[in-house]
Amino acid sequence: MDQTNRSVIVGESVVVKWLTPPAPLPHPAPDVFAHLTEVGFTATATPYAAVSRAGDGGELLLALVTAYLPDARDGWQWCVDEAASGGTAFATELGVLAADLHVALATPSSVFPEPVRHTRDSREAKDGSRDDWSARAEDAVREALALTGGKAGQWLSTVADSLRAGLAPLAVAGTTPLIRIHGDLHVGQVLRWRDGYAVIDFDGNPTVAGADPFQPAARDFAQLITSLEHVGQVAVRRRGADPLAIGEWAAAARAALETAYRTRLAERGHAALLDLSLVRPFEIEQECRELIYAARHLPRWRYAPLGVLRSWYR
C-alpha cells in the first residue's frame, strides 16, 4: 500500500528506498534508526545510510539504505495467508515485537536522551496535547465523511454520531506516557523473513502532516490491532474466505496480540506505556484515516475500513 515511495533491491544486499518526492529534513526515520541501533533493537532491517542533498528551502532526504532481508514478505501477504488458514500463533510473536519496539523507543539514548514525556490535565497542559488528540480525531471523522461518497458514504453518515461518541475518552483529563511511536504501524510494515520478523518504515502516518512525534503507545497499538481486521477483509475479498470464520479469526488474533503485548510490557517494566482507554478512540480515528487514504490514493482499498466499521456498528 505504499504509494509514495519506491524501493529498489541492489544485489540482494541492500534496499534503497527513494522518497518521492524528497522529504525535508529533519525527517523522523534517520533519528529513529540511530536511536534503535544505539539501544540494541535489532528486529528491523539494519540501517546503513541516509542520502540527502541541499534544496532551495534546506536539506532534503532523498533515500534510505537498509539491509536486504532474504525471503521477506510483508503482512499483506503472509498475514493474509494466516487468516485464510485460520492460524493465530503469529499474533503472540507480533505482540512481543510491538512491545519490544515501544520499550526500545522509551529507552534513553544519545539521540533521544529524554524519550518519555507525560501528559497532564488538559486545562493545565501548555501544549494542549490531549485537546489536540480530540481535534485530530474529529477532523479525521469529518474528512472521512466528506470524502466517502455513494451508498458507502450514506451508510457512514448513519453512524457518524456513534463514531464521534467513541472519541470521548480523548477529551477526558488524565495522564499517559508519550513516546516517539512508529506512527504507521500495521501488518504491512512487518516483514516475515528467513530469520523471523522485522518492523520497517519509520516515516510516520502518510495521512497526517505535522503531528507531534511524541504520542501514546496506544496509537501504534490501535493501528496494528485494527490492521488484523483489515487482513481479514482482504482474505474474504481476495481468497474467498468465509466472513463468519474470519470474524472469529480476527477476534482471536486481536486477543492473542493484546495479551502478548501487555505481558511483554509488564515483563520489561513498562506496563504503564499502554493506556487501554485510548485504544478504541484511536481505532476509530485510524479507520477514518484509512477511508481518507483510500479516497486520496487507493480507491479500491475502501472496502477494508468500511468492512471493519460495519462489523463494529451493525
Image (cartoon, rainbow, N blue to C red):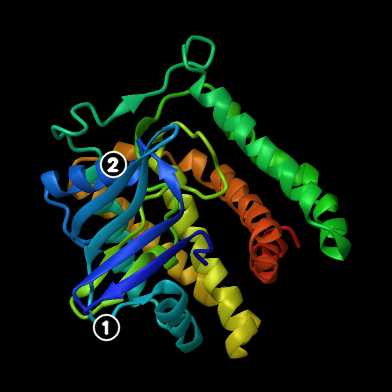
| Residue 93 position within the rendered picture, expressed as x and y whole percent measured from the top left | 28, 67
- Residue 188 visible to the viewer: yes
- Report whether 166 appears left or right of 90: right
Tag 2: Cα neighbours inside 10 Å, few (<14), some, or many (≥20)? some
Q: Quadrant of residue 164?
A: top right
| Residue 311 position within the rendered picture, expressed as x and y whole percent measured from the top left | 68, 65
Q: Residue at x 67, y 53 (%)?
A: 292
Label 1: element kind: loop
- 26 vs 314, nearest the viewer: 26
- Amino acid on which the number 1 mark rests in the picture: Asp
Q: Quadrant of residue 188?
A: bottom left
Q: List the residue tagged with mark 1.
A: 71
- Report whether 242 appears left or right of 159: left
| Residue 175 position within the rendered picture, expressed as x and y whole percent measured from the top left | 42, 25
63 up-or-down from 87: above or below = above
| Residue 290 position within the rendered picture, expressed as x and y whole percent measured from the top left | 62, 57
Q: List the residue tagged with mark 2.
A: 271
91 up-or-down from 117: above or below = below
Q: Nearer the viewer, mark 1 or mark 2?
A: 1
52 up-or-down from 111: above or below = below
- Amino acid on which the number 2 mark rests in the picture: Ala
- 185 vs 11, nearest the viewer: 11
Label 2: element kind: helix
Q: Residue at x 44, y 80 (%)?
A: 77
